[in-house]
Amino acid sequence: MKRTALLAISLLVSVTVVTAASPASAATRTVQAEAYAAQSGVVLEQTADTGGGQNVSYLANGDWMRYDNVDLGAAGSLTIQARIASVPGGGSIELRTGSATGPLLTQFTVAGTGGWQAWTTLSTSVASHPTGAQTVFALLRNGGGDFVNINWFSFGDGQPGGAGWVVMDQGVWQQQLAQFDAIPNRTIPPGAVRVPEFNATCSYSHSRPDDPIVFPNMPGASHMHSFLGNPSTNAATTTQTLLQNAGTTCRPGQDLSAYWIPSLYERGQVVEPKDVVVYYGSRLADPTRTKPFPQGFRYIAGDARLQTPTPAGSVNAFYCAGPGGEIGRSTDGNWPRCAPGATLMFQLVFPDCWDGIHLDSPSHKEHVAYGNCGGQFPVAIPSVSFLIAYPTAGSADGFQLASGMASSMHGDSWMAWDNAALGQRVKNCVVQNAKCNSAGNY
């Protein structure tokens, strides 16, 4: 039952809509859920969601809201999102145009998010829709009882402002998840190392002053990068070009992903990595929550703009591995000097929690986070780390990255695995908490 009396249907509030200057713009129009022109069965409350304000709450089967003058923009595809919080039980939210029985614009399936103020964003895409200003009805459907709170709806390309956000096709993602869920668990042999992990072992492929994530279709716009994995990677790279190119410098061959890091220089000469192990694992207390990456997922770890000293003991720093280890520092103190039998190394750790909506974001980091995976970033993805080994011990002269100081070390990943191969490794190795090799075997 709802905690307060239902608001009178005569309560009228002007719709708050963020619109673009032109209907043809890609900007997103955001409609606050409490900004209805009419309603039935709706309660308002203060929200704990980002940005504060109010949300509509404790919605149940048959409740509805009407929004007037919602600009759906020009003809073409439309991404529609709903910001919701829910308890277990589930149901659906229908959006219809014109009337409560008008054409179905889209429908969101609601599952429990963990509580009435545990917020997540649902996303759908439609290929066609009514254009311009429309009356939109939101109707709630379930088997009975309160099941969802709503903070806002958006209509456009995924985020206010729009630029840089790449919205995932939820239908494709749900199909990939269904295939993943159907993979049977392998039997873990006695004596297997119980660590949730598998890897792709990659060698150097090529160098280019390109970055298809940060500077797409802008050849030469970046500092020099050393590319690993897919040999086709350049400024014009897309998910399709990666999948269509059968080559890779990684083992296994089903990993057609592109990985890259800034090139390293010693006394003006480039030092390419002798090998990079891309580890896929879990840092969560419960690795069974982990899902595979969707096709085309990309993100960045580290910051090319960070130019600060990295003295001995700094976190996220270069180090020496092997006999003798570190024997000193460079003259400027920013780089280790390794013993003759040791190797210069760097481990770069990527975020392991995802918003479940976007394949990319404007900073290439806003759709992901480090942590326990909940709230705005509810989906646990494999914790990826690059373990980079360079065939050098260094000297008092130190090194330089193409991006500058040692602190500017960073890496990019554009995922293009064969879905079955990736899904099997996530299921058998990460979810089952067993260490696997590059072939996906125990």
Image (cartoon, helix red, strand yellow):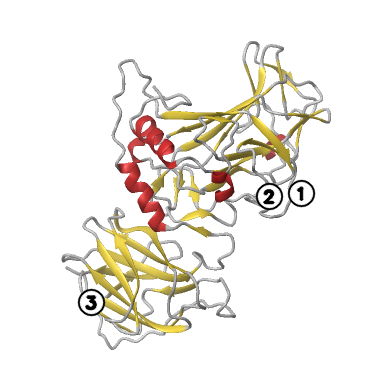
Please tell me the numbered disc located at residue 235: 2
The kind of residue on which mark 2 rests is Ala
* Location of residue 173 with respect to 146 vertically, above or below: above
The kind of residue on which mark 3 rests is Gly
Q: Nearer the viewer, mark 3 or mark 2?
A: 2
| Residue at horizontal 49 percent and vertical 49 percent from the top | 368
Q: Quadrant of residue 218?
A: bottom right
The C terminus: image quadrant:
top left
Q: Position of residue 328 (x, y in %)?
A: 73, 18
Residue under numbered circle 1: 220
Residue that extends furthest to the right in the rendered view of this protein: 268
Depth check: give the residue in front, 170 or 238. 238
- Left or right, 102 with respect to 15, comes to left
| Residue at horizontal 39 percent and vertical 64 percent from the top | 83
Q: Position of residue 413 (x, y in %)?
A: 57, 42
Q: Position of residue 79 (x, y in %)?
A: 46, 67
- Left or right, 195 with respect to 186, comes to right
Is there a contact, CB below 8 Å, between mark 2 and mark 1? Answer: yes
Cα distance in 3D space between marks 1 and 3: 58 Å
The kind of residue on which mark 1 rests is Gly
